[in-house]
Amino acid sequence: MKKAASRASSPKRAAAPRAWQRMLSGRRLDLLDPSPLDVEIEDIAHGLARVARWNGQTTGSNIFSVAQHSLLVEAVSRKISANLDRKWRLAVLLHDAPEYVIGDLISPFKAVLRADYKAVENRLLHAISLRFGLPARWPAELVGHVKKADRHAAYLEATRLAGFKEAEARKFFGSPPGLDAAAEKRYLTPWNAETAEKRFLARFAELSDEK
């Protein structure tokens, strides 16, 4: 009669790695299967206000945050298309919202990671979009608009904050946008985290149906 294998000799099943992040709101956001129900705008604003653009390689006593970048891109988008629907303006504001979870990787590093990074980013953006009444998949025209505004904003950030020469910035980001001096001063003077968070939430409230 064969003896039953002892518990000690049984192979242990490895615990699955944690794939969720706890937010200050108390939500747990699963990166592998993010639910719109676990997305809160306060968590997004708080996180983005503390994530640095350009890996922190910018001038000024404060980082230039993704929250401030998002507001700059939305301002640039208004110059590109003054008649853009309010719903799509909200989409522009939220275009980098996944970075409140995954951070802002510089473009060269994204190129190294390629599909893996993009898959996670897309899942998060789909959940965020659904949470705030936007389609999970954005229309191609909107995606193109966001990319154009994002590149224009990147040109300004590169030349005003990140040490790029204008010719070099044109090579990577295209021609400069036409923001006036007052707008450039407002959006390109790095804010502290509290200011960036408050201004991001204020603009969200103006553009969204959530009051």
Image (cartoon, rainbow, N blue to C red):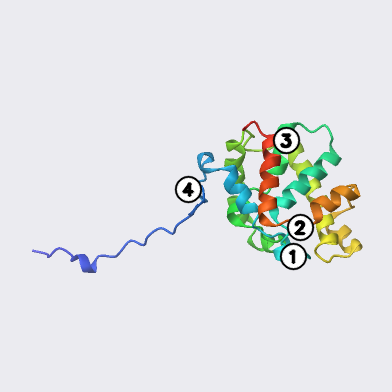
Q: CA distance from mark 2 to mark 4?
A: 29 Å
Q: Write down the residue under mark 2.
A: 190
Mark 1: give few (<14), some (14-19) or many (20+) Cα within 10 Å: few
Name the kind of residue labelled 4 in the image: Gly
Q: Residue at 48% of width from left, 55% of height from top? A: 19
In this figure, what is the number of numbered marks?
Answer: 4
Q: Quadrant of the C terminus?
A: top right
Q: Which mark is residue 61?
A: 1
Mark earlier in primary sequence (2, 3): 3
Q: Amino acid at mark 2?
A: Pro
Nearer the observer: mark 3 or 4; the answer is 4
The residue where tag 3 is placed is: 88
How far apart, in angstroms, are the residues tagged by discs 3 and 4?
A: 29 Å
Near mark 2 (Cα within 10 A), the count class, few <14, some 14-19 or many ≥20, is many
The picture quadrant where one finds residue 200 is top right
Q: Specify the farthest residue to the left.
A: 1
- Residue 13 vs residue 148, the one in the foreground: 148
Tell me, yes or no, if residue 198 can be seen here. yes
- Secondary structure under tag 2 reads loop
Q: Which mark is nearer the camera, 1 or 4? A: 1
Q: CA distance from mark 3 to mark 1?
A: 33 Å
Pointers 1 and 2 in contact (C-beta within 8 Å): yes
Residue at 82% of width from left, 31% of height from top?
83
Residue at disc 3, secondary structure: helix
Return the disc, 2 or 4, that comes first in the chain's sequence: 4
Name the residue tied to disc 4: 26
Q: Secondary structure at mark 1?
A: loop
x, y percentage for residue 109? 68, 63
- From the viewer's perspective, tell me whether residue 20 is left or right of residue 113: left
Query: Does residue 95 appear in the picture of this structure?
Result: no
Q: CA distance from mark 1 to mark 2?
A: 8 Å
